[in-house]
Image (spheres, grey):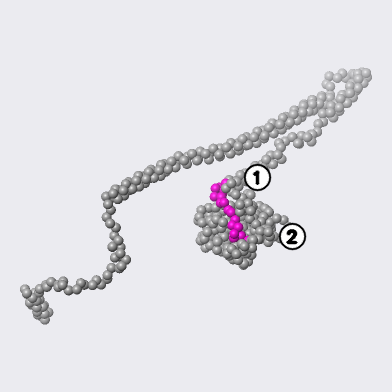
Amino acid sequence: MANRDTEAALSTALEETLQPGCFTLTPQDLSGPPVVQPYPRSPKLLRKAEQAPAPLTQEQLSRYLEELKAEEARTEAHLQSLKKRKANLAKRVEVMKQQAKERFDVMRAALQRDEQAVKDSLDLDRRETSAKLNQIIKEWQQHLSAVRKNTVSAQNAMEPKGDAAPAMNIIQHRWNCRYFIIFVWIFLYQYYSCHKKPDAAEESIRLNQERFQNLLRKLQQISTHLQAQLQRKTFLLDGSNVVIDQATSHSQIAITGEGRSLCISSDASDPQSQSHPLQFDQVYCALATSPITTGQHYWEVDVRCCPAWAVGVTYCSLQRKGRDKGAKLGRNRMSWCVELRDGRLTAWHNDRHVVPTGIRGRERPGTVGVHVNYKKGRVAFYDADGMELLQEFSAKLTPVFDRVHHQFIEPLYPAVRFLRPQEGHLGPCHMEIPDLQA
């Protein structure tokens, strides 16, 4: 009941307030001072407003329209060129396939000719051996016929005569005895003359097995070398032009041959070069001039004339001063390498090492091949003479090393290092980087 009284009172008060003449709107007096904006525009915006471009003239609009039409024509022509290139891709690839097929057909034809020559040689050996054996067989068949003939004669001589006269006189008996003695002598002569022994020369009449086994060994060597060269051919497509940086290498490393030949020489020291901040001052190390930042790369280092060496890759952040582990290949997280020290080959990264599986029981490599797949974080070392894998560093295949460091985070530089040779070594200390793009 109280609520109803309250609502009625509010309604009455509202009606009285809205009576005509009680609520009016009066215009604002505009004659006073201007109202100040709470947030005035900045001077920079005011200057831009003052420097607003003037509207273009008809001549300027015409020239601008002509430029747009010319740009449209150039764009259409470029698009047509790209579409034409795309359409020609299939034809170009077919031409390249045909050219590659012709090269392989030449090799296949050479192999087929050599295979046919080997088969013909084996057939000739078979015919010659067969002819010799036929001659020996013919001689033994003649001997067998003579033995059989003498056998029949001996059997006839041993058989008694059924028609002999019981009353044989003494003269006939003596003549028969003489004939019998003559027959025995003839039989003994024929027996000993027909007694044939196998000749030792007969044993030598056979296929030339020694020559054939030598042929198989040569074919195996050729097959192994061919497979290695085919694999090397694939790597050579990614061959890099590695040139050593003279400015950052150790001062006693002499670099010649367009930056591809290195040797230790006391005459190579240059006092002025010691001030370079990125030069190695204690470790006999040298880096290439160009870094690896993407893709796949392959290069080789000839180490035949170097008794102790290290070949690998490193980040540019490798230390250059001092002889601690931070300045040595493979003794830190910034570098990977294989090295030969005291006649023993090892692979190093992050101050850990393993014995390369590919070198066990073999001589040391004469040329080391290095293949880098930067995107996959893979670096592999090969014996380039036979393309045998020495060691591979990757997150999948090298669990003994720290996997987190096999996604390269900096540009890589090809690197080499001269190690201390064994005592008493007086030979040369030289490395060579072949030009694989020549």
Residue lying at 54% horizontally and 58% vertically, measured from the top left = 412
The structure residue drawn at horizontal position 61% and vertical position 62%, both measured from the top left corner, is: 273
Mark 1 lies on residue: 221
Instruction: Nearest to the eye among marks 2 and 1: give it.
Output: 2
Disc 2 from disc 1: Cα separation: 36 Å
Q: Amino acid at mark 1?
A: Gln
Q: Give left or right: position of 140 versus 72.
A: right
Query: Badge 1, how many Cα within 10 Å: few under 14, some, many 20+?
Result: few
Frontmost residue, 265 versus 222: 265
Verify whether residue 249 appears in magenta.
Answer: yes
* Range of residues picked out in magenta: 233-250
- Where disc 1 sits, the SS reads helix
**Can you give x and y, in whole percent of width and height, for residue 170 in the image?**
93, 19
Quarter location, residue 10: bottom left
Residue 359 seen: no
Q: Element type at marker 2? A: loop
Residue type at numbered disc 2: Gly
Tag of residue 424: 2
